């Protein structure tokens, strides 16, 4: 999908979000693993670059290996972006690729909210306002007179 191509926003009910979890879990697990790998390799390359600068230039016997490592890192970054793009194509937002924090758009009382899921959770069981973030998560099964119930969240039909 081209970067400038707009994806029509999709709204999920709690049930729809939970039905999508087998695919979402698989992509999110791959994304988290690739993120950790990319971060570790990028940190290692950054340390090597700093050490090289500290030793004052000169002939670089390992320039070819460094170039290969940087090219491999770029490929892995593209793979990571591909995972994020796959989720985006489903109308799902990745909030933290390192942890697998995922938000599904939903509707509650006519306003947009997020259904929130974190890799490792068995089901989509939380929601929050668009601006609230992870710290503002609330249970979809609040069961109070003030709180919504799972059936209150609207999605695309």
Image (cartoon, rainbow, N blue to C red):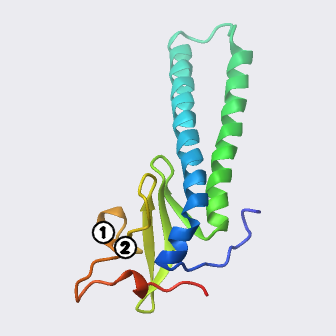
Q: Residues within 10 Å of mark 2 (few under 14, many from 20)?
A: many
Q: Which residue is mark 2?
A: 128
Residue with the most extreme bottom position? 110
Sooner in the amino-acid sequence: mark 2 or mark 1: 2
Pointers 2 and 1 in contact (C-beta within 8 Å): yes
Left or right side of 125 for 66: right
Residue 46 against residue 65 in the figure, above or below: below
Relative to the observer, which residue lies in front, 1 or 103? 103
Percent position (x, y) of residue 57?
61, 12
Quick one: quadrant of the C terminus?
bottom right
Percent position (x, y) of residue 91?
61, 71
User: Dividing the picture into quarters, in which one does residue 153 lie?
Assistant: bottom left
Q: For the point 56% across and 14% down, which residue is it?
A: 52
Relative to the observer, which residue lies in front, 28 or 93? 28
Quick one: quadrant of the N terminus?
bottom right
Residue 113 against residue 125 in the figure, above or below: below
Relative to the observer, which residue lies in front, 21 or 41? 21
Left or right side of 132 for 80: right
């Amino acid at each position: 999908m081209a970067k400038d191509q707009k994806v029509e926003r999709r709204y999920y009910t709690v049930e729809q979000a939970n039905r999508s979890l087998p695919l979402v879990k698989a992509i999110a697990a791959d994304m988290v693993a690739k993120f950790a790998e990319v971060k570790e390799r990028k940190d290692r390359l950054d340390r090597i670059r700093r050490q090289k600068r500290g030793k004052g230039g000169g002939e670089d016997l390992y320039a070819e290996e460094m170039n290969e490592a940087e090219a491999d890192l770029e490929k892995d970054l593209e793979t990571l972006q591909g995972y994020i793009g796959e989720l985006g194509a489903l109308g799902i937002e990745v909030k933290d690729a390192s942890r697998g924090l995922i938000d599904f758009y939903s509707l509650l009382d006519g306003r947009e909210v997020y259904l929130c899921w974190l890799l490792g959770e068995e089901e989509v069981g939380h929601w929050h306002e668009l601006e609230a973030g992870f710290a503002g998560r609330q249970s979809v099964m609040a069961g109070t007179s003030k709180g919504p119930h799972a059936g209150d969240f609207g999605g695309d039909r």
